[in-house]
Amino acid sequence: MALGKYAVDYEERIDYPRLRAERLARAKAEIDKAGLGAIVTWDEANIRYLTGYYLTTPVRPLEAQFCFCPRNGGPHLVGGNDQEGLITRMPWMEGRIHPPAGIAKIAAFRPDDPVVKRVVDQIFSFMVEHGVEKEPLGIDGTTLSYIYAEAFKARGVEVVHAKPVMDHARMIKTKDEIELMRISCANSEKAFAAIVDAIRPGIRECDLVGIGIKALYEEGCDHTEDLVCCSGFNTNPYGWSFTDKPLQVGDLVYIDVDGASYQGYKCCVYRTFCVGKASSEQKAVYEECRAMLYAGMNTIKDGSTDWQVLDKWPASPEYWGHKTWGEVGPYALGHGLGLTLHDRPFFNRMNQVAGVPQQTFREGMVLAVETYAGQKGGKFGVRLEENILVTKEGYERLSLWPIEELMECWLPYR
C-alpha cells in the first residue's frame, strides 16, 4: 500500500467512479461475449461489482435484492432498504433503483407461484425496456434457479447459467481493485500484530480470534469471517476453526485472517507462531511448509499455469500420511481473491486428478497460495499462506507479515 486509505484532495488514491465504471465495463464485455441479452444476479459480490451496493450479511441468504444488467445499458438494482434514499446516495445509478415486486425465496414453492410471476414480470419489463426480451437471459446467485428457469421458459425466454460469466469478469482486477486488496492485506498486519502481542500461555484460541477481529474492524473492515485459530494438538490434523482450548508453552498456533473485507475486497493470510521457544523439529517443519509454498509460488507469472505450481508440490497424498487426494485436498492449494474469499481460479491436486483442465494465470489476478506440513499422527502442524498479485514477470507479494522463519512469541526471559 503506497498511499493512505482515505479520500484526500492532494493525491490520487482510490478513484471510485473509475472503479465502478471499469468493473461494469468488464462485466458487460463478458455478458456480450457469452451471447446474452442480460444477466440477473442475486449474488452479493456480483451485485456490488455491478452497482457498488453493499448487502449486509443478514439479507444475503434472503435473496431480497438483485441486480439486472443488460448488455446495452446501465444496471438496475432491485431491493435494499429505502429505495428513495439509495437513489440519493448512489447518483451513479441514475435512478435505476426499484422496490422489489416480491421476495420469492421465502414464499415460492413452484414456478407458477404468484410471487415468482411478479418477480419474473419485473425482470421481463427491464428486458423489454432494453430491447433484449428475445435474447437469452443469464441467471446467477439464487437457490431458485430451477423455479426461475421454468417461469421464464413459460414466458418464452431462454435462461442460461451465468455464474461463469461474472466469475470471468472478476478474475482480472482493475487498478483500484488491486489497491483495495493491498489495503485489505495491510489491515491483516494490524490483526497479526495484536494477536502476537497477546499470545501467551492460558489465552484461548477464541480469545485470539476476538482480538484479531477487533483490530480489523478498527481499521475499517466492513466484514470478516471468523479467523481460523488452531493450537497444539488442534494443528494436526489440519483444522479450519477455533475452540476454547488454552494455549500452552511450546504450542504451535496457526491463524488465518480470512475473508477480512475492506470495501468488499478480501484477504486470506495464514501465519504460524510458537508459544515461547520453538524446538528444532518445529523449526524444520516450518521451513518444510515455507519451502513448499515458495517453490509453487515462484512458478507463477503471466502465462504460467496452475499445473506448474502443482508440479512443485508433493506428488502423492502419502507425503502427509494419507492414501487419497480427497483426504488432503486442502493441504496445498491456491485460489483467487477479490469480492469473495474464493474467486476463480481454484487449484489443487484433487481437482487435477478429477480432470479439471489446467488454468492459465494472467497479469492482474490476485491469488492466495497456501500449504501445510505435518505428518499424520504428529503432535503439531504448520500452515502458511501468501496473497500475491500476478505480474508480467512474476508476482508482487501483498501479504507482508514476516514469513522467513517461525516467529517465537511470549519470550519474557529474553
Image (cartoon, helix red, strand yellow):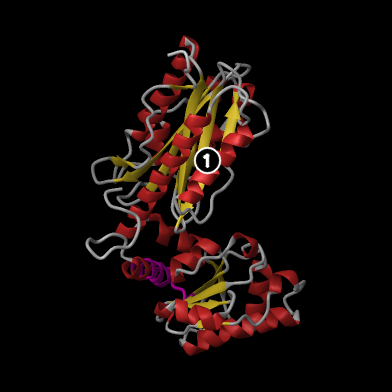
Above-or-below relation of 205 to 213: above
Q: Residue at horizontal 48%, vertical 66%?
A: 48
| Residue located beneath label 1 in the image | 212
Question: Is residue 27 shown in magenta?
Answer: yes
Q: Residue at horizontal 69%, vertical 78%?
A: 116
**Residue 277 or 360: which is nearer the viewer?**
277
Q: Position of residue 188 (x, y in %)?
A: 44, 42
Q: Position of residue 219 (x, y in %)?
A: 44, 50
Can residue 262 be seen by looking at this rendering?
A: yes
**Residue 24 or 86: which is nearer the viewer?**
86
* Position of residue 94 in the picture relative to residue 152 (left or right): left
Q: Secondary structure at mark 1?
A: helix
Classified by dominant secondary structure, the portion drawn in magenta counts as helix
Q: Position of residue 41 (x, y in %)?
A: 54, 69
**Residue 145 or 282: which is nearer the viewer?**
282
* Position of residue 390 in the picture relative to residue 353 (left or right): left
Under mark 1, the amino acid is: Gly
Q: Position of residue 311 (x, y in %)?
A: 40, 30
Above-or-below relation of 258 to 136: above
**Residue 12 or 309: which is nearer the viewer?**
12
Q: How many marks?
A: 1
Which class describes the residues within 10 Å of circle 1: few (<14), some (14-19), or many (20+)?
many
Please provide the residue range marked out in magenta. 22-38
Can residue 334 be seen by looking at this rendering?
A: no
Q: Residue at horizontal 63%, vertical 24%?
A: 202
Above-or-below relation of 132 to 22: below
Of the 4 image quadrants, the one containing the C terminus is top left
- Could you say which quadrant of the image residue 63 lies in? bottom right
Above-or-below relation of 283 to 170: above
Question: Is residue 244 shown in magenta?
Answer: no
* Position of residue 61 in the picture relative to residue 354 (left or right): right
